[in-house]
Amino acid sequence: MKSVLAATILGTAMMTTAFAQAAPETNHSGAHSGVLSLDAQAVAEVPTDTVTLTLGAEQEGADPGAISTALSRKADDVIAQAKRTSGVQAETGGFNIYPNTDRNGKISVWRGRAEVRITSKDFAAASKLAGQLANQMQVQNVNFTLSREARTAAEAKLIDQAVNAFRDKALATTKLFGYTSYTIRDVHVSEGSNNPGPRPMMARMAAAPASFDSAPVPIEGGKAQVTVTVSGAVQMLK
């Protein structure tokens, strides 16, 4: 009986010792020691492939109802014409009717503004259409973005670079601290993109000749920055 008890105690002690050797080192506060937190990035400049043109028209008068009707009709006409253009999408933008008052606080005139947004991956078609619509609505703003498909394709290429950069950084930093290798404790992968800002454009003059109004609007895209970040923590090993 004593021999069995002694063997049991000895076996328990050996299991406890083995567990203590396998567990990560801890400091006096109970936190794991030799844990390194780091991150690595892969970045690429990708040409934007989508353009959004904001077209606007303004009108003023004494009757807000008449202004609203006229602007609504103009926006509907512009959208209808845009939708007849292959590869172009159009939607209603901002719409606002507001009064202007004189020094006595009385309404002197009503003003209204309507906007239509045109979006396309075909820059040439969007440029030509904007020129054709210039006598109804003028280009107020041009914004270039990266489509979801293009962004996903760019991220797929960058993720390998980011993961390899994380591994290389983890190994190099581990050796700088006097360790020889590491194991990953946790890791996270995140993606992001930064599109170029919108470009405001001068409104075309109402007195411009028709030939000028029908000229294509100059459109030249920029580049969006796509980033993949790998971040996490590793356990450095002796």
Image (tube, rainbow, N blue to C red):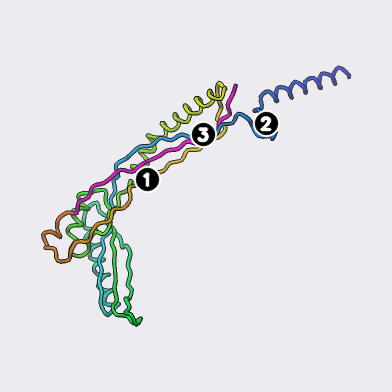
| Element type where label 1 sits in the image | strand
Q: Where's residue 227, x and y in %?
A: 40, 39
Q: Where's residue 80, x and y in %?
A: 23, 62
- Counting residues from the N terminus, which is met first, the one under dot 1 or under dot 3? 3
Question: Is 38 situated left or right of 3 in this image?
Answer: left
Q: Where's residue 8, x and y in %?
A: 81, 21
Prevailing secondary structure of the magenta residues? strand
Instruction: Give the quadrant of the C terminus.
Output: top right
Tell which of 86 and 211 is nearer to you.
211
Check disc 2 and give the amino acid type.
Asn
| Element type where label 2 sits in the image | loop
Residue at which label 2 appears: 27
Q: Image height check: is 238 above or below 39?
A: above
Q: Quadrant of residue 177?
A: top right
Tell which of 117 and 27 is nearer to you.
27
Q: Image height check: is 75 above or below 103?
A: above
Q: Where's residue 134, x and y in %?
A: 19, 61
Q: Residue furthest front?
A: 103
As drawn, the label of residue 194 is 1
Check disc 3 and give the amino acid type.
Leu
- Whether tag 2 and tag 3 are in contact, CB under 8 A, the answer is no
**Is 67 within the magenta?**
no
How far separated are the C-alphas under marks 1 and 3? 23 Å
How far separated are the C-alphas under marks 2 and 3? 20 Å
Residue at which label 3 appears: 38
Tell which of 148 and 37 is nearer to you.
37
- The magenta region covers 217-238
- Counting residues from the N terminus, which is met first, the one under dot 2 or under dot 1? 2
**Is 227 within the magenta?**
yes
Residue drawn at (24%, 51%) of the image:
87
How far separated are the C-alphas under marks 2 and 1? 42 Å
Badge 3 crowding class, 10 Å Cα cut-off, few under 14, some 14 to 19, many 20 or more, is some
